[in-house]
Image: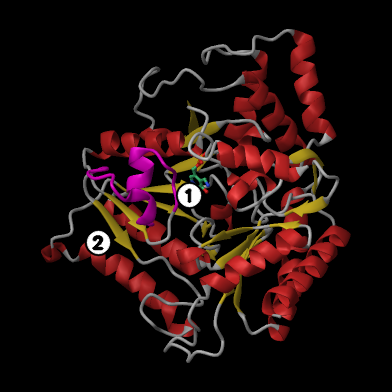
Amino acid sequence: TNTRYLDRQDQFESKVRSYPRKLPFAIASAKGAWITDVEGNEYIDCLSGAGTLALGHNHAVVKDSIQQVLDSNLPMHTLDITTPLKDAFSERIYNLLSTKDDEYCLQFCGPTGADAVEAALKLAKQVTGRTGVISFSGGYHGMTHGALAVTGNLSPKQGIEGLMGSVQFLPYPNGYRCAFGLPKTQSIQAHSTYFERFLTDIESGVTKPAAVILEMVQGEGGVNAAPIEWLQQVRRVTKALGILMIVDEVQTGFCRTGRWFAYQHAGIDPDMVVMSKAIGGGLPMAVLGIKKQYDVWQAGNHSGTFRGNQLAMATGLATIDYLDANDMAQYVDEVGTWFKGQLQALQTRYPQIGDVRGRGLMLGLEIVNPKASADVDGSYPADSDLAARIQQACFKAGLVIEKGGRAGTVLRLLPPLNIIREELDEVLTRLTLALDNALA
Ligand code: PMP
């Protein structure tokens, strides 16, 4: 039973750190968008291995790709020495990033997103000779020292002093709860103006940073999709001032938002692109894309034993080929727009859903207390207790979702990209049931 495994986790409470506190089940198997626990209960998975499983669980093309590597006796590990598989994988990523104006070189990184963030921060310092970094409130970049330093959430930093020098945080636009307390119509302009003035007011004590690092849609920070105009302004200003723009596509990349990369919505050219999660098709992989003119490193400058795992290249390549052959960016754009409309329809019935936001199949619901008085920007206070109750009710209704945002008040939906409408209808049915149960 589930209890048997959960009890064992509890016994080992001090030894085994894991998810079961939030999602109390033991998984027996999973296929597509469905998970089955050890008691035979079925759940729809709107977490997708934290966004790593673009094609859901155990997709045939992913499984076949692993089998092919095994059958070919390719070494499991090559210490970053090239193989025909690495050659094909690298060419694929190079072609996805490079445009007629910009060529991107690739740095394979230790297999987690955080390691690729570390690489980007180090390289930005070396390229510019400057040390500071600008980051954003609510941004999430990982748990290692450098990545944590630029993460805009204080709770994981407690007791870890002196992370990395000179990180300045600026407000990230949020269409529902504006940092400046302004209504939607004025909020984007205010963020754009503030960003430029902050960096150009040389008398203010602001030191010119090496880089700006940001997500195009903040995932862990509560599914905040940055407005296109603001992203274009950040690009314009950083370019004019010679500050590198590092775009963290760890969660948004590989069709998640309805484009291959989320920065393409804004038509901008990042100086570096951080990639992980879906790039490995479910196995660990991280790669940093670097605009050619900033690729000043020599081989070995950012090394790590487990860079470029062969199996992850196979599963990553199989996933990317499938996304391409099936025009998944387009599909996610369409199905995501439809699904967001359905969630907005739900919002009209449940005023506790203060905001529905996100792009493609990266969507979030901010849970609020609509009985309190509204703020100047029209937002209601976030309700973290209710958000937690809804998440638990979803779990009981057979729907796995995650929470994010400040104090966990945003319900996050990250289904597999190939989820079909009938399954999303089932997500809506289960979510509605959960809302009714949590509010009863
Ligand atoms: N950047 C973003 C945007 C992420 O969402 C995450 C992980 N959730 C990371 C970086 C860190 O990746 P990892 O957990 O693989 O180190």
Q: Horizontal and vertical percent for residue 316? A: 67, 32
Residue 55 visible in rendering: no
Residue 31 is tagged as none
The three-letter amino acid code for the residue at tag 1 is: Asp
* Along the viewing direction, whichever of 131 and 142 lies nearer the viewer: 142
- Is residue 147 in the magenta section? yes
Q: Are marks 2 and 1 in contact (CB under 8 Å)?
A: no
Residue at figure coordinates x 67%, y 55% from the top left: 414
Distance in Å between CA atoms under marks 2 and 1: 20 Å
Q: Is mark 2 within 8 Å of ligand 1?
A: no
Question: The magenta stretch spans which residues?
Answer: 140-164
Nearer the viewer's eye, disc 2 or disc 1?
Answer: 2
As drawn, 45 above or below 52: below
- Is residue 3 in the magenta section? no
Identify the secondary structure beneath mark 2. helix
Residue 269 is tagged as 1
What secondary structure prevails in the magenta region?
Answer: loop
Residue 199 is tagged as 2
- The reply, left or right, for residue 225 in relation to residue 431 is left
Q: Quadrant of residue 49?
A: top right
The three-letter amino acid code for the residue at tag 2 is: Leu
